[in-house]
């Protein structure tokens, strides 16, 4: 069987991860940096994608410049032009005619970790069926996301990964202030994720909010740094809504007052 051929534009975390993973999967990989692509002295061959050279041209650049990069690509009609941006639809790939999107639902911290994470990952795909060839090569699982749902899909991905990092950074800040390592809390997070996977969010919820114990939440707010209080309360109320344990109007006013008041 002839190896699939891919040219990847963008040698950052995403591009490097895809390049390494697809190379290990037996694909022929040509990795072109964004700088090379926009350099007028070296970009001509990278911008021209002929069917005798490449099957797939995969754009792995920051979202705001995907359309700019796609607009100067000259691709044969048989070449698939795709991007890996989660929030963008297929319209940004004009004027190419065979277009697709392949967004991995994994955090690509660097190319080494990323290439491993891509193996067996979930991918949101749309457009040309060739996109599933990438998923198959990486032993992944494909989900199809409608164009109208792309932005909400990506918001969910950001919540699941990027905002989780921000939340754990807040944990780290509090833990370090009291002389404890972040590692002491990470097993708690892992077990909680396992519980959510097995039971669903509502059944997995534990802690004071699940019991309607708003007096403990009040004590937490009074001890937290003023900048940490509103995020904490917002998450507490979101958790309470899962199990129909919202505070009374009086309790809510007291909680909001605690957010605004200096210790």
Image: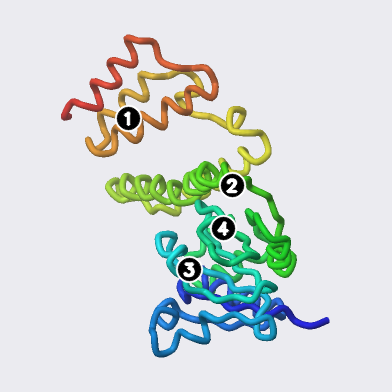
In the image shown, does 162 or 216 lie closer to the viewer? 162
Q: CA distance from mark 2 to mark 4?
A: 20 Å
Q: Name the residue at 32% across, 30% down.
A: 220
SS class of the residue under badge 1?
helix
Furthest residue toward right? 1
In the displayed structure, does residue 219 sit left or right of residue 29? left
Q: Name the residue at 41% across, 48% down.
A: 168
Say which mark, if any, is on residue 147.
2
SS class of the residue under badge 3?
helix
Q: CA distance from mark 2 to mark 1?
A: 42 Å
Q: CA distance from mark 1 to mark 4?
A: 33 Å
Residue 190 percent location from the top left of the image: 56, 47
Cβ atoms at labels 2 and 1 below 8 Å apart:
no
Q: Pointer 3: what residue?
A: 71
Residue 132 percent location from the top left of the image: 72, 62
Q: CA distance from mark 3 to mark 1?
A: 52 Å
Say which mark, if any, is on residue 106.
4
Residue 90 percent location from the top left of the image: 57, 56
Say which mark, if any, is on residue 220.
1
SS class of the residue under badge 4?
loop
Classify the position of the N terminus by image quarter.
bottom right
Furthest residue toward left? 262
Residue 86 vertical position relative to residue 50 in the rendered view, above or below: above
First in residue order: circle 4 vs circle 3 = 3
Q: How is the image coloured?
A: rainbow
Q: CA distance from mark 4 to mark 3?
A: 28 Å
Q: Quick check: can you spot residue 144?
A: yes
């Amino acid at each position: 069987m002839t190896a699939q051929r891919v040219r990847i534009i963008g040698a950052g975390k995403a591009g490097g991860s895809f390049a390494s993973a697809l190379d290990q999967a037996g694909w022929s990989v040509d990795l072109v940096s964004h700088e090379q692509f926009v350099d007028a002295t070296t970009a001509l061959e990278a911008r021209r994608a002929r069917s005798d050279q490449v099957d797939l041209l995969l754009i792995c650049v920051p979202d705001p410049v995907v359309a700019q990069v796609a607009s100067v690509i000259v691709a044969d009609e048989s070449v698939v032009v795709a991007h890996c941006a989660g929030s963008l639809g297929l319209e940004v790939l004009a004027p190419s005619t065979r277009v697709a999107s392949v967004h991995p639902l994994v955090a690509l911290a660097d190319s080494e970790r990323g290439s491993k994470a891509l193996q067996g990952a979930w991918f949101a795909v749309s457009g040309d069926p060739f996109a599933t060839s990438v998923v198959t090569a990486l032993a992944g699982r494909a989900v199809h996301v409608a164009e109208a749902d792309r932005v909400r899909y990506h918001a969910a991905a950001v919540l699941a990964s990027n905002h989780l990092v921000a939340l754990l950074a807040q944990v780290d800040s509090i833990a370090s202030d009291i002389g404890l390592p972040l590692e002491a809390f990470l097993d708690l997070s892992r077990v909680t994720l396992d519980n959510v996977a097995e039971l669903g969010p509502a059944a997995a919820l534990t802690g004071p909010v699940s019991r309607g114990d708003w007096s403990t939440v009040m004590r937490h707010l009074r001890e937290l740094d003023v900048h940490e209080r509103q995020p904490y309360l917002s998450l507490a109320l979101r958790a309470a809504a899962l199990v129909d344990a919202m505070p009374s109007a009086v309790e809510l006013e007291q909680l909001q007052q605690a957010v605004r008041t200096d210790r």
